[in-house]
Structures are given as structure tokens and as C-alpha cells.
């Protein structure tokens, strides 16, 4: 008996071959499930004015403000996506054995198609190129150790600017940050921070304050620096700059991020192909109210 020719191992690993095989299976399934195919008139996505009002009301209830024009456009696009993937999920018969909402059907359809368009086993070179193009994702934040003396802008007596300037002059020649515990106005803020990352400093004091602390010379009092709490004198004790983590240390994270991006891109490509089969009908834009804003 003649032996069957074997396919080269390299060919078996080709993602295009996987795509062709899985695509063929889906096509065959759709060909047999003709009764579940939407009729031509069903290839219309109609978003009514009432639906738009409902989406806007739900947004306002959640965020305690009306959506901006850009946010409303995003809600409508998401509703169209939901309708398209819902119809395609019905065409595949995914609703036959389970009573689920349209969003669940959309997820089922996305799970079915998300692995068709990429090789699920990236090699080292692919991951290294992905890492090199996105090193900002794999960077340790700058860290700071500093002490601060706060002066309230509404303090009685000397204005904050004058009080801060006099305190700074008196602290020239200080050999440590001990004065942080005795000078300045009362505050619930800590007087010292130990190797706190710059994002936490910015969340507490603001980005301008953080930039000034990052540039202040260590080992002496400097300022005053403004924040939402008032004016501050600062003593920087230690500082570690931002640093890119080595690829070997974050390889697992890189692979997980790569897979996520590939799945998202594959889902988007499938959705764009499906969307082209539909006519999308939207309500006319609402008239702009005089004096209204989208903020």
C-alpha cells in the first residue's frame, strides 16, 4: 500500500492554514443552517430615537451627568456592534440551547472567531519586537523620598508666600528634614514620604508639584512649590528615576499583552467584515440647544 504524503511540519504551524481550515468549517456550518440565516430585510440595523434616549438616560444615571457628543457617538457605535454580532450569532444558531441576552451572544461569536487570524504561539523574535515598540508599558515609575512643610493660602497673619520665604531662609544650612515636624501650618497630610512612586505623588499633589520635586536638588530645603493644598517647602532625601524593565523580567506580561492585542485586532477585523453586510439606520441628530454644552 502506498504511503500518504505527509505535510511539512512548518506548514502545519502556519496560521493562514489554521484560518483557512476554521473558516471552511464555519462556512460549511452556515451552508447547512440556511433556516437560521437572516433574511435580506433583516440586514438593517435600526437605532431609534427612543433607544438613543434610553442610552443617554442610563449614562446620566451612572455618571451623574449627560454624555458628551463624542460619548453619545460611542454608545451608538457600541449598540450597532451589539446588533451586528447578535444577528451573526443567531445565524450560527448559538441561541438554540440557551436563552441569553444579545450581549452574551456577541461574546460567544467573538470567542468563536478571535483565534482565527493570528498564530497563538509567538516566538521570541515576535515578542521582543512587540516589547521594543511598547517599552513605556514595561517601565518602573520614578520613586521619591521627601519631606514637606505646608503653608495654607488662607492662613491668618503673614501671607503664605511671605511665611514660606522666611522659613526657607531660616532653613538654609539645615542638615536634615527634621523641621518638617515643627514648621508650617497644621495639615492632615503626611510630613514625609518614603519611596513613593511619581504617579501617587501626582494623584495627591498634582503633576506640576511632582515635576518640581523630581527636579529639586536632594539634601536641602527648596521651594516654595504650589499644590492644591497651598505652598510647600520640600526636602528630597532619595530619588530613583524611571527605568525600563528588562525583557526577560517581563516576558510573561509581554506575551499576555500580545495575545490580548491580537485577539482584539482579530475581533475588530471580523466585525468590520460583518458590518459591511448591514445597512445601519440612525435617527437624525438632535437639534443643538442654545447655550448648551457637552461638558
Image (tube, rainbow, N blue to C red):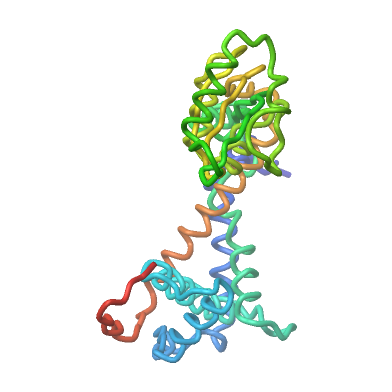
**Residue 106 horizontal/vertical position (percent):** 59, 72
Q: Nearer the viewer, residue 293 or 30?
A: 293
Q: Tell me how many marks there are.
A: 0
Q: Quadrant of residue 62?
A: bottom right
Q: Quadrant of residue 102?
A: bottom right
Q: Nearer the viewer, residue 54 or 143?
A: 143
Q: Nearer the viewer, residue 274 or 227?
A: 227
Asked if residue 44 is positioned above or below residue 120 in the image, the reply reads below
Asked if residue 220 is positioned above or below residue 142 in the image, the reply reads above
176 with respect to 41 (left or right): right
Q: Residue at x 61, y 76 (%)?
A: 103
**Residue 130 horizontal/vertical position (percent):** 53, 33
Q: Residue at x 52, y 54 (%)?
A: 266
Asked if residue 67 is positioned above or below residue 123 in the image, the reply reads below
76 with respect to 27 (left or right): left
**Residue 180 horizontal/vertical position (percent):** 68, 26
Q: Residue at x 41, y 83 (%)?
A: 45
Q: Residue at x 70, y 32 (%)?
A: 191
Where's the N terminus, which quadrant?
top right
Q: Nearer the viewer, residue 101 or 40?
A: 101
Asked if residue 204 is positioned above or below residue 194 in the image, the reply reads below
Amino acid at each position: 500500500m502506498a504511503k500518504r504524503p505527509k505535510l511539512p511540519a512548518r506548514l502545519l504551524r502556519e496560521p493562514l492554514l489554521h484560518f483557512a481550515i476554521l473558516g471552511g468549517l464555519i462556512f460549511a456550518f452556515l451552508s447547512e443552517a440556511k433556516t437560521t440565516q437572516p433574511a435580506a430585510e433583516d440586514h438593517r440595523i435600526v437605532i431609534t430615537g427612543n433607544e438613543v434616549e434610553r442610552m443617554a438616560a442610563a449614562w446620566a444615571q451612572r455618571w451623574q451627568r449627560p454624555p458628551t457628543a463624542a460619548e453619545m457617538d460611542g454608545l451608538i457605535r457600541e449598540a450597532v456592534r451589539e446588533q451586528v454580532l447578535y444577528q451573526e450569532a443567531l445565524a450560527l444558531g448559538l441561541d438554540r440551547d440557551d436563552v441569553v441576552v444579545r450581549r452574551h451572544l456577541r461574546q460567544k461569536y467573538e470567542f468563536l472567531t478571535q483565534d482565527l487570524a493570528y498564530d497563538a504561539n509567538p516566538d521570541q523574535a515576535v515578542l521582543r519586537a512587540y516589547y521594543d515598540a511598547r517599552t513605556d508599558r514595561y517601565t518602573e515609575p520614578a520613586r521619591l523620598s521627601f519631606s514637606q512643610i505646608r503653608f495654607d493660602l488662607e492662613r491668618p497673619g503673614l501671607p503664605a508666600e511671605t511665611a514660606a520665604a522666611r522659613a526657607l531662609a531660616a532653613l538654609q544650612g539645615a542638615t536634615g528634614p527634621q523641621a518638617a515636624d515643627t514648621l508650617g501650618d497644621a495639615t492632615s497630610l503626611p510630613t514625609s514620604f518614603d519611596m513613593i512612586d511619581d504617579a501617587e505623588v501626582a494623584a495627591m499633589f498634582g503633576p506640576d508639584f511632582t515635576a518640581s520635586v523630581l527636579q529639586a536638588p536632594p539634601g536641602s530645603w527648596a521651594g516654595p512649590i504650589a499644590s492644591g493644598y497651598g505652598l510647600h517647602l520640600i526636602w528630597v532625601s532619595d530619588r530613583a528615576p524611571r527605568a525600563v524593565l528588562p525583557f526577560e523580567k517581563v516576558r510573561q506580561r509581554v506575551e499576555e499583552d500580545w495575545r490580548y492585542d491580537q485577539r482584539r485586532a482579530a475581533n475588530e477585523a471580523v466585525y468590520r467584515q460583518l458590518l459591511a453586510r448591514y445597512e445601519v439606520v440612525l435617527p437624525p441628530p438632535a437639534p443643538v440647544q442654545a447655550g448648551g454644552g457637552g461638558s
